[in-house]
Image: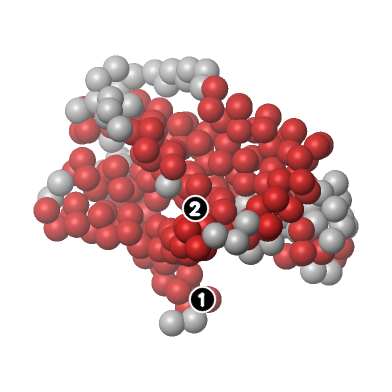
């Protein structure tokens, strides 16, 4: 299957699920409380780390990473590439499993994860055209922003910030991290996007700061989606205030 056909099928499945949920279930429930947003430090920390990377560490960190030639890292990179490509299919499989088992809770959690991932991707793709940052393989350095050629000529070359792949994975996993706020091992969820970060860095497609900011973006979208869901679906999912 070609890559374009793969992503087309992925998008078609997501639109089908979105249409189903818009008519019944996720978006059809009445609100059961007010949305309360609490201050979260992780997205802010990652965003500030991205800013420091842009200013001081991007080139140095990337050069150190390129100098490493360990078999374990290559395996991790391959895993990160796999997760970035197949994550939506895995989540949609869980969604359809929930439909088959008639589990409303499983279906809603799966849909919330893919919805958060899609919203993070939309935000990332929009910001690419705001910053127009040159990718590392263009050899323009880490401080090459607002390249008008990204709008008039080769947009892909100047779409380094943020990383769409990382945002997709972090959006879904960030949602699950905040959704299972009582789960003892939920911090392990935050490790899953790290192989995708390494994959994007090793492919020379992004600067380290791009991935940090993308991780922050995904976690922020995931948190907002989880909080909105708790307000919207408390009676259905058995979520306590």
Residue under circle 2?
195
**Up-down: is 139 above or below 33?**
below
**Up-down: is 180 above or below 54?**
above
Q: Position of residue 85 (x, y in %)?
A: 46, 64
Asked if the residues shown at circle 2 and circle 1 are in contact, with their CB atoms under 8 angstroms apart, the answer is no
Colour scheme = secondary structure
Q: Is residue 176 left or right of residue 127?
A: left
Q: Is residue 132 left or right of residue 203?
A: right
Looking at the image, which residue is at 56% across and 51% down? 197
Residue under circle 1?
3
Residue 155: quadrant of the picture: bottom right
Outermost residue, bottom side: 1
Of residue 83 and residue 152, the one placed in the foreground of this image is 83
Q: Regarding mark 2 in the picture, which secondary structure is present there?
A: helix
Looking at the image, which residue is at 20% across and 33% down? 236
Callout 1: few (<14), some (14-19), or many (20+) C-alpha neighbours within 10 Å? few
Looking at the image, which residue is at 43% across and 82% down? 1
Q: Is residue 129 left or right of residue 167?
A: right
């Amino acid at each position: 299957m070609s890559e374009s056909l793969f992503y087309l099928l992925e998008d078609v499945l997501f639109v089908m699920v979105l249409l189903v949920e818009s008519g019944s279930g996720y978006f059809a429930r009445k609100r059961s409380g007010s949305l309360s947003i609490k201050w979260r430090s992780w997205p802010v920390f990652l965003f500030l780390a991205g800013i420091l990377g842009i200013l001081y560490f991007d080139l140095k960190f990337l050069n150190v990473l390129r100098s490493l030639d360990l078999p374990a890292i290559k395996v991790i990179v391959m895993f990160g590439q796999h997760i970035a490509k197949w994550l939506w299919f895995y989540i949609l499989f869980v969604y359809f499993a929930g439909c088959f088992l008639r589990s409303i809770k499983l279906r809603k959690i799966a849909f919330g994860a893919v919805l958060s991932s899609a919203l993070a991707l939309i935000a990332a793709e929009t910001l690419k055209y705001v910053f127009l940052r040159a990718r590392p393989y263009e050899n323009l350095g880490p401080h090459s922003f607002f390249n008008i050629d990204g709008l008039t000529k080769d947009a892909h070359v100047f779409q380094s910030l943020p990383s769409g792949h990382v945002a997709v994975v972090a959006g879904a996993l960030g949602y699950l991290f905040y959704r299972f706020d009582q789960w003892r091992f939920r911090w392990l969820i935050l490790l899953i996007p790290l192989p995708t970060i390494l994959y994007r860095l090793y492919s020379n497609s992004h600067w380290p700061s791009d991935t940090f900011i993308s991780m922050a973006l995904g976690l922020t979208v995931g948190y907002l989606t989880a909080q909105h869901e708790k307000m919207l679906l408390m009676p259905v999912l058995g979520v306590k205030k």
